[in-house]
Amino acid sequence: MYLRHLSLVDFRSYPSAEVELEPGITTFVGLNGQGKTNLVEAAGYVAGLSSHRVSQDAPLVRAGAQQAIIRAAVVRDGREQLVELEINPGRANRARLGRSPLTRPRDVLGTVRTVLFAPEDLALVKGDPSERRRFLDELLIARQPRWAAARSDYDKILKQRNALLKSAMPVLRKGSRRRTDRDPEEVERALHTLEVWNGHLAEVGSSLLYARLRLLRDLLPYLAKAYDEVSAGRGAAQATYRSSLHEEVATQIAGGDVPEQDALLQAMHASFEQVREQEVERGVTLVGPHRDDLVLQLGDLPAKGYASHGESWSFALGLRLAAFQLLRSDLGTDPVLVLDDVFAELDAGRRERLAAMVGDAEQVLVTAAVADDVPATLTGRTFHVTLGEVSREPD
């Protein structure tokens, strides 16, 4: 699997750009602000329909333009397929596959996979739980694209349930004035509606949690090995899943067990019962995958707050490299590996070890402000990027 051609129209700083790509190592060199990261950001968007730099689509469209277009020619198993995406802020995005319109953009997921490591990934170790949840879910979707629909459904149901909790607060809250002279039928309706949304959220949430736990179980051996290699054996990287379910099940999960989905479904319902009063008081859902965390550890200590800067970089690298190796094993072919401005952040030893670990990938896209930041072992084609102009260096 590799990208053969990347075409941009009004994407970020580019009115237009055409970049011919090949298997092996490709390096984009340019000073900060010249547009090199925009190229690999576009490649990542084709793979995952999201950016590693921003959470909204609007910044991806060039100032003054109405939409951005990304076209990518993807070669897989010797066959080429064209992916075309229209990014329309404030309106529905559109997608084509092989020039045929798709009902939903997410139907292109799985056509190409990427694993991207960027300076922002330090937040995987030092940032909020949302960063680590996103890592798990993006890898889950890259592994099995059907989880994109489940993730979307979960977010929609969660939004509806939170809205219900807020609207039901005056009816159900203990000690409220309305509760003393409320209509019993009104209370019954509110409780019944809450139970309905409990059922929806528990069904989708338990399936998403089950998939995350299975993913983590498969990922951990690759994480331990990747961290060991990139850090030259300085510490043991581990990760455990911290669940928001009731204590008994949460303890079981933290110990590395993966309960069956039916057991997780029952545990979610039981947890909803336990926290109902708290949820009504606060008007927010307190149980579910959106409240969970991936706890990263070096030895017996949590990485967050205890790992040095270098150890944090090694851990973030280990997570991405583990994701790459897991997808390589699952798919029987390599995802496209993207290293965005990372070598400047690493010391000489980590640079060389990272280069040795990724040199055999089918396609590696590297960005760097200075060519000398890239280890000499990662030799390949070089493009120079200057003010949105992309030119290939002669071989």
Image (cartoon, grey):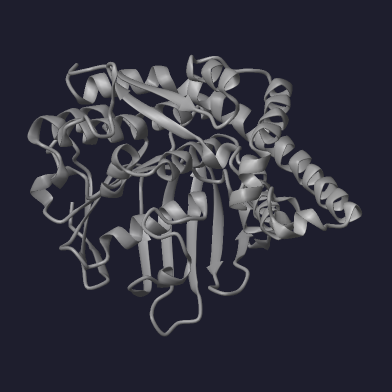
Residue name at image x 16 percent, y 32 percent: 308
Q: Position of residue 51 (x, y in %)?
A: 43, 56
**Is residue 106 at least partly visible in the picture?**
yes
120 in relation to 393, above or below: above
Compare residues 22 and 208 and report the one nearer the observer: 208
- Is 377 situated left or right of 183 in this image? left
Choose between 296 and 20: the one closer to the eye.
296
Q: In this view, does 28 lie above or below 213?
A: below
For this orientation, the residue located farthest to the bottom is 64
Foreground of the two, 216 or 100: 216
Residue 323 in the image: x percent, y percent?
41, 31
Residue 14: image quadrant is bottom left
Asked whether, in this view, residue 127 is left or right of residue 241, the answer is: left
Rendering quarter of residue 227: top left
Q: Residue at x 58, y 47 (%)?
A: 109
Q: Is residue 88 above or below residue 179?
A: below
Q: Which residue is drawn at 78% across and 54% down?
A: 180
Side of 378 where 117 appears, left or right: right
| Total marks placed | 0
Q: Where is residue 8 in the image (x, y as percent from the top left)?
A: 42, 68
Res 141 seen here: no
Residue 274: quarter of image: top right
